Amino acid sequence: MIRKARTSDVKDIQKLLAIYANKGEMLSRSLSELYEAIRDFYVETDEEGRLIGTAALHIMWEDLAEVRSVAVVEESGKKGIGSRLVQACIDEAREIGLKRIFCLTYRPDFFSRFGFALVDKSTLPHKVWGDCLKCPKFPDCDEIAMDMML
């Protein structure tokens, strides 16, 4: 079941993101950051109510948002959970009138299935790079930038 995240989900979201952050595949997020951004997040839970996936739509500007923090519990992979979560973000972006969404990813094939296309990172606004300053890979980012017009 996909739903908007609740404050009671934050600690589980942080634990899930930390798994991928420890592999160098995404940024870790502090509890403070997650509580402040809780309205950005969707989660999927299993039949017992355990969090098994998350994704966020983070508004950057009037017409631009980032799909980020897409993560699925490893044992629940390959079941379409990540796809459903990303689609929920895309649907919300359309609903609120955004014109463009983007992502920074190591999995371009996954995002291309939704209509995201490769773009040069320099085409993204400078505001996007605020989180990059916290990344251990900065300034040698190896993520792939993609965007999609809505």
Image: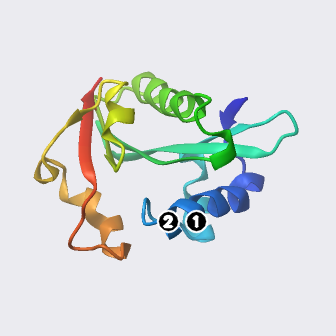
On the image, the x and y values in percent for residue 88 come to 53, 28
Q: Position of residue 107 (x, y in %)?
A: 36, 44
| Residue 126 position by quadrant | bottom left
Residue type for callout 1: Ala
- Image quarter (top left, top right, bottom left or bottom right) of the C terminus: top left
Is residue 145 placed above or below 30 in the rendered structure? above
- Residue drawn at x 45%, y 22% is 95
Residue under pointer 1: 18
> Which quadrant: the N terminus?
top right
Quarter of the rendering containing residue 10:
bottom right
- The residue located at (30%, 73%) in the rendering is 137
Asked if the residues shown at circle 2 and circle 1 are in contact, with their CB atoms under 8 angstroms apart, the answer is yes
Which residue position holds label 2?
A: 21
Question: 27 or 80, which is in the foreground?
Answer: 80
Foreground pick, 94 / 73: 73
Under circle 2, the secondary element is helix
Q: Amino acid at mark 2?
A: Ala
Few, some or many residues within 10 Å of mark 1 (<14, 14–19, 20+): some
Compared across the picture, whether 31 is left or right of 58 comes to: right
Side (left or right) of 57 relative to 107: right
Q: Position of residue 35 (x, y in %)?
A: 63, 61
* Residue 65 location (% of width, % of height): 35, 42
Kindly indicate the quadrant of the structure image that contains residue 132: bottom left
10 Å neighbourhood of mark 2: few (<14), some, or many (≥20)?
some
Q: Which mark is residue 28?
A: none
Q: CA distance from mark 2 to mark 1?
A: 5 Å
